[in-house]
């Protein structure tokens, strides 16, 4: 499975974690992983996607009004995903998106999934991930082995006041697989309006599934770069 690790090319800790990620995937079979430098607040204004409108009543729009650095950071993050959507479409084959703190736990085995497949489900609601909040920490992903549909008791839902309200949100964007079909749907949504990446990737815009056991976990150190860092 081809995979892209997105990292911050001028931030030493991100470079270090992405190198650790590469080594972890090299230890298992059937992965073809490469590093890709991501868009950052320093480069985001030169990107074509910078001019896409922001979704009405969205989380990203709040950041634009409240905190310039965090807004440009979150905007950079979602643009990284939009570029990945285009890459999957151009390749015309499923691919995996990884953040720099992804660590592989097992070899890739081809599975049949429709559009969007969460690859780190077992770890997203546990420390050091920031989603390990009180309302989510006890959530148990139903299933044992294979690809599963999102369950109705899944608690992380889109809560902003627009037409995506009530849909399932991505539990972060640290590790997911995407088919060309799913990439086309997400790109169509993104080219109309942008929101924070894990808000944009929701069940209104793409069919979401998850894989158990999870083949990817998090690095023990969370760099929290999506909150905005001064380098």
Image (tube, rainbow, N blue to C red):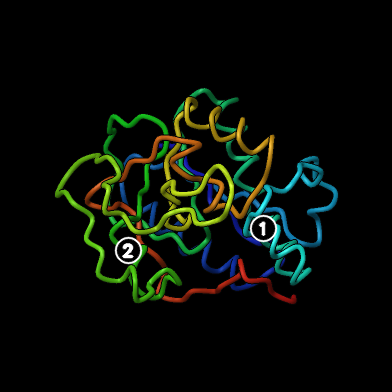
- The image shows residue 106 at horizontal and vertical percentages of 27, 52
Give the number of marks: 2
Q: Which of 118 and 208 is in front in this view?
A: 208
Q: Residues within 10 Å of mark 1 (few under 14, many from 20)?
A: many
**In this view, 71 is above or below 207:** below
Q: Which label lies toward us, 1 or 2?
A: 1
Q: Residue 93's spot in the image, x, y percent?
A: 47, 26
For the point 14% across and 49% down, which residue is it?
Answer: 144
> Alpha-carbon neighbours of circle 2 within 10 Å: few (<14), some, or many (≥20)?
some
Q: Percent from the top left, x then y, of residue 196?
A: 61, 55
Helix, strand or loop at label 1? It is: helix
In the drawing, what numbered circle is on residue 208? none
Instruction: Answer whether labels 1 and 2 touch (C-beta < 8 Å).
Output: no
Q: Is residue 58 above or below residue 226?
A: above
Identity of the residue drawn at 78% across and 68% down: 68
Instruction: Name the residue located 60 percent from the left edge and 25 percent from the top edge.
Output: 90
Disc with the residue nearer the chain's start (1 vs 2): 1
Residue at left offset 41%, top offset 32%: 115
Give the percent coordinates (x, y) of residue 53: 76, 44
Q: In which quarter of the image is residue 157?
A: bottom left
Disc on res. 123: 2
The residue labelled by disc 1 is 60
Q: How far apart are marks 1 and 2 (CA)?
A: 25 Å
């Amino acid at each position: 499975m081809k995979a892209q690790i997105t990292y911050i090319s001028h931030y030493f800790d991100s470079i270090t974690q992405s190198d650790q990620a590469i080594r972890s995937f090299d230890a298992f079979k059937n992965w073809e992983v490469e590093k890709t430098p991501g868009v950052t607040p320093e480069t985001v204004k030169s990107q074509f996607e910078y001019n896409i409108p922001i979704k009405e009543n969205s989380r990203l729009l709040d950041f634009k009004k409240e905190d310039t650095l965090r807004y440009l950071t979150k905007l950079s993050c979602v643009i990284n995903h939009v570029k990945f959507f285009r890459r999957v479409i151009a390749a015309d084959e499923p691919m995996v998106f990884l953040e720099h703190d992804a660590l592989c736990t097992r070899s890739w085995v081809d599975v049949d999934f429709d559009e969007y497949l969460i690859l780190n489900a077992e770890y997203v609601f546990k420390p050091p991930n920031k989603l390990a909040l009180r309302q989510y920490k006890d959530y148990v992903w139903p299933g044992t082995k294979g690809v599963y549909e999102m369950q109705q008791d899944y608690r992380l839902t889109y809560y902003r006041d627009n037409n995506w309200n009530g849909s399932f949100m991505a539990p972060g964007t640290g590790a997911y697989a995407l088919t060309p079909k799913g990439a086309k749907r997400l790109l169509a949504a993104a080219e109309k309006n942008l929101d924070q990446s894990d808000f944009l990737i929701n069940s209104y815009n793409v069919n979401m599934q998850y894989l158990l056991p999870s083949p990817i976990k998090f690095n023990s150190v969370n760099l929290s770069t999506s909150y905005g860092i001064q380098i």
